[in-house]
Image (cartoon, rainbow, N blue to C red):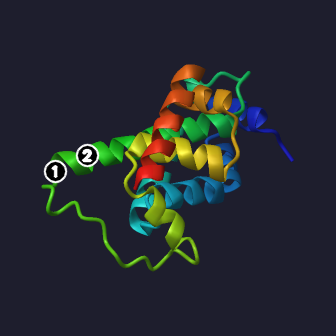
Amino acid sequence: MQSDGELIERTLKGGDHYYGILIQRYADYVFGLCMRLTGGNRASAEDISQQSFLKSYKYLKAYDSKQDYKNWLTGITGNCFKDLRRQENRYESLDERAEPTFYPELHGNKDFFLLIKPLSAEEKILVVLKYLYDYQNADIGAFLGMKLGTVKSKLSRALDKLRWN
């Protein structure tokens, strides 16, 4: 099996089909992360997943081979989620933004999705990466371009918000 670094190197040399292997390797991971971030909204999760892979491909030349590709892709996915939330907030009135109460894709995760519902997009990303995917704070900071202290303080505020809701 070829390493992520080898596949990226071959893709950059003009072998675009090698990028397809990376997509297959990480599609389930990215989609699962997106499902958790969107509260089980399958259509949004699919959109964010596609955007994540498109942006990853577009900026592949900027990828630092010293960094783990999965971690880099996780950061891109988090940013794509935040971008989608900003777009939704720009075009929808507050009345239209009410999240649906029907969750067809939750499969036993309804309590979790209801728990994180009051969090902002950034807080959801932090909580999901920390407590569902068990990433260390330093890794989360690297994915999202935040300092370690910032990650800790934002996680603390998110947990306080969850305690009081």
Residue 89: percent from left, percent from top = 22, 48
**Label drawn at residue 160:** none
Judged from this view, the residue extending furthest toward the front is: 164
Could you say which is closer to the camera, residue 56 or residue 99? 99
Quadrant for residue 7, please give it. top right
Is 26 above or below relative to 66?
A: below
**Label drawn at residue 87:** 2
**Label drawn at residue 91:** 1
Q: Is residue 77 visible?
A: no
Quadrant for residue 136, please give it. top right
Is 92 above or below relative to 127?
A: below
Judged from this view, the residue extending furthest toward the right is: 1
Q: Residue at x 57, y 54 (%)?
A: 33
Residue 70: percent from left, percent from top = 67, 40
Q: Which residue is drawn at 81% across and 39% down?
A: 3
Q: Is residue 152 left or right of residue 94?
A: right
The crowd level at tag 1 (other Cα within 10 Å; few <14, some 14-19, many 20+) is: few
Residue 92: percent from left, percent from top = 16, 55
Is 93 above or below relative to 129?
A: below
Residues at badges 2 and 1 in contact (C-beta under 8 Å)? yes
Element on which disc 1 rests: helix
Screen quadrant of the C terminus: bottom left
Q: Residue at x 68, y 47 (%)?
A: 22
Element on which disc 2 rests: helix
Q: Is residue 107 left or right of residue 4?
A: left
Residue type, mark 2 in image: Gln
Residue type, mark 1 in image: Tyr
Q: Which residue is drawn at 67% across and 49% down?
A: 133
